[in-house]
Amino acid sequence: KAGVTQTPRYLIKTRGQQVTLSCSPISGHRSVSWYQQTPGQGLQFLFEYFSETQRNKGNFPGRFSGRQFSNSRSEMNVSTLELGDSALYLCASSLEGQGRTEAFFGQGTRLTVV
Amino acid sequence: AQSVTQPDIHITVSEGASLELRCNYSYGATPYLFWYVQSPGQGLQLLLKYFSGDTLVQGIKGFEAEFKRSQSSFNLRKPSVHWSDAAEYFCAVGEYNFNKFYFGSGTKLNVKP
């Protein structure tokens, strides 16, 4: 079956712009979580959605937001981009959205802010 | 607070040599533990996981890990490393009721020919 699909794979944006990233989970999976990966901070949890509801949010400013649609696809949005937002953004798809359920990661979206 | 520590940032081993990557965790209860591998510019691939039961778990690509509650450790091992194992390895703790992980800072593995 198809894996987790993240689009686009690469993005270059200018400071002050906004960006929307997309994550299509594995068919039937109801939970999507998002992570930011940078060389300095490593993998940091952004938020998690389950059945269109945000259940968890990490320690990121309000410029970072997300949503999940009825088909479980998720989007995250970053407004007023800063240079420090340059990172690899990963999403993880999970069937039940519980810790003992394996999560499958997409290949990520590489965002560069210039 | 939950946390994961991987004390080794870089490790270099010769092809064919054995490998052990260290991982220590801090969690309030019995943890769900994972090891993921990441090739450059790619996502994370699950190597193995521990939920309960036998403390020695087998994973893909010949990897295994041992859960030691007394040491709060979940070290990853492989008896003979292949050049294709060169990548970055992440240890993680999973939240009980959510699709949420706490990751270590990662260990980059370099394999010498």
Image (cartoon, coloured by chain):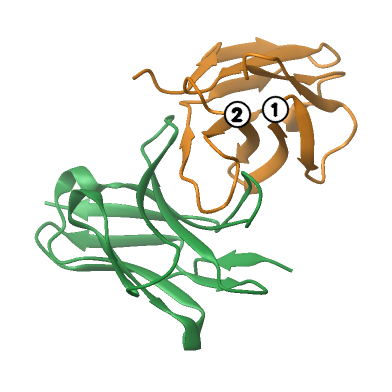
Of all residues, the one furthest to the bottom in this rendering is B70
Q: Amino acid at mark 1?
A: Ser
Q: Position of residue B86 (x, y in %)?
A: 27, 47
- Marks 1 and 2 sit apart, C-alpha to C-alpha, by 6 Å
Q: Is residue B73 above or below residue A100?
A: below
* Left-right relation of A63 to B29: right
Q: Residue at x 77, y 19 (%)?
A: A77
Q: Residue at x 11, y 51 (%)?
A: B113
Which residue position is annotated with label 2?
Answer: A30
Same subunit, tags 1 and 2: yes
Q: Mark 1 falls within which chain?
A: A
Q: Residue at x 86, y 15 (%)?
A: A16
Colour of chain B in the image: green
Q: Position of residue B24 (x, y in %)?
A: 51, 73
Q: Mark 2 falls within which chain?
A: A
Q: Which part of the image, by quadrant, shows the N terminus of chain A?
A: top left
Q: Which chain is orange?
A: A
* Left-right relation of B106 to A61: left
First-in-chain label (1 vs 2): 2
Q: Are marks 1 and 2 in contact (CB under 8 Å)?
A: yes
Q: Amino acid at mark 2?
A: Arg
